[in-house]
């Protein structure tokens, strides 16, 4: 009866598989199946050892096959990612167009609803009414002329429940400031002094000489 001892060391699956193949071939060729070997204090026949080794080979080969299939599947999936992502984005847009951007049905597709616009209809009508009043007060003038006009008061409008706009008091134009008014009036011409040229007679602004 032969006695075998084992020593546990870190092994790589590929190296272990090759050792299993070699040991299996050697046991089957050189030892009788009924030969009993002492392995870690236990009696094990060659037939049982060979069966255990072959079971490992079958499992190892199945893992290798699964790993190859997984790698192939991963490559196929990665190739489909870009096209599928593009399709999903296009479908989200199409679904929103079909049911509406704020439809509760979007939740069943896992699509969030669009946020409602902050400016409601009443606020929009009010802003348009104020703008119309301001344009009427300022008139259809050039850009700089419109900016020069100053007004007192804020245009006010009221929007009724049936979306009618009721205008309030209109802003009042301010008169130009005194400085601006004075600047627009030309200064009087200065009185002439001295003698008229050519004849030596006194000018209108000179005093005649006494005898």
Image (tube, rainbow, N blue to C red):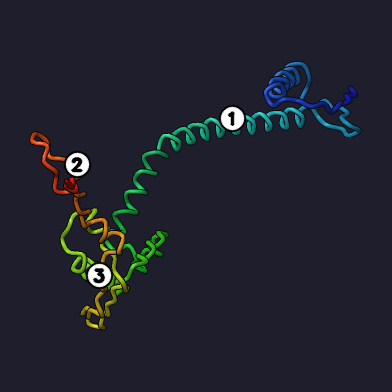
Spatial separation of the CA atoms under disc 1 and disc 2: 123 Å
- Give the residue drawn at x 32%, y 71%: 120
Q: Which sits earlier in the primary sequence, circle 1 or circle 2?
A: 1
- Give the residue drawn at x 68%, y 29%: 54
> Residue 70 versus residue 86: which sits nearer the camera?
86
- Give the residue drawn at x 32%, y 74%: 153
Q: Which of marks 1 and 2 is in front?
A: 2
Query: Mark 3 = which residue?
Result: 173
Residue 14 located left or right of residue 143: right
- Considering the numbered disc 3 on the image, is that residue within a helix, a strand or a loop? strand
| Quadrant holding the N terminus | top right
Question: Residue 60, image x and y in percent?
Answer: 64, 31
Spatial separation of the CA atoms under disc 3 and disc 2: 50 Å
Q: Which mark is residue 194?
A: 2
* Corner quadrant of residue 152: bottom left
Q: Which mark is residue 64?
A: 1
- Give the residue drawn at x 36%, y 39%: 83
Label pair 3/2, CB-CB below 8 angstroms = no
- Considering the numbered disc 1 on the image, is that residue within a helix, a strand or a loop? helix
Residue 74 against residue 137 in the figure, above or below = above
């Amino acid at each position: 009866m032969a006695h075998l001892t084992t020593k546990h060391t870190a092994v790589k699956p590929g190296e272990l598989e090759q050792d299993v193949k070699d040991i299996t071939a050697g046991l089957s060729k050189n030892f009788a199946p009924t030969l009993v070997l002492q392995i870690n204090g236990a009696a094990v026949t060659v037939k049982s050892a060979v069966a255990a080794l072959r079971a490992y080979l079958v499992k190892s080969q199945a893992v290798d096959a699964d790993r190859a299939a997984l790698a192939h599947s991963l490559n196929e999936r990665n190739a489909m990612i870009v096209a599928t992502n593009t399709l999903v984005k296009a479908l989200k847009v199409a679904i929103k167009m079909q049911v509406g951007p704020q439809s509760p049905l979007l939740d069943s597709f896992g699509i969030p609803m669009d946020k409602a616009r902050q400016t409601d209809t009443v606020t929009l009508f009010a802003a348009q009414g104020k703008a119309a009043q301001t344009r009427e007060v300022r008139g259809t003038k050039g850009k700089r002329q419109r900016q020069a006009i100053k007004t007192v008061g804020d245009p006010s409008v009221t929007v009724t429940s049936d979306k009618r706009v009721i205008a309030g008091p209109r802003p009042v134009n301010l008169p130009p400031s005194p400085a601006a008014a004075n600047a627009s009036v030309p200064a009087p011409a200065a009185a002439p002094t001295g003698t008229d040229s050519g004849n030596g007679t006194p000018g209108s602004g000179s005093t005649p000489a006494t005898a």
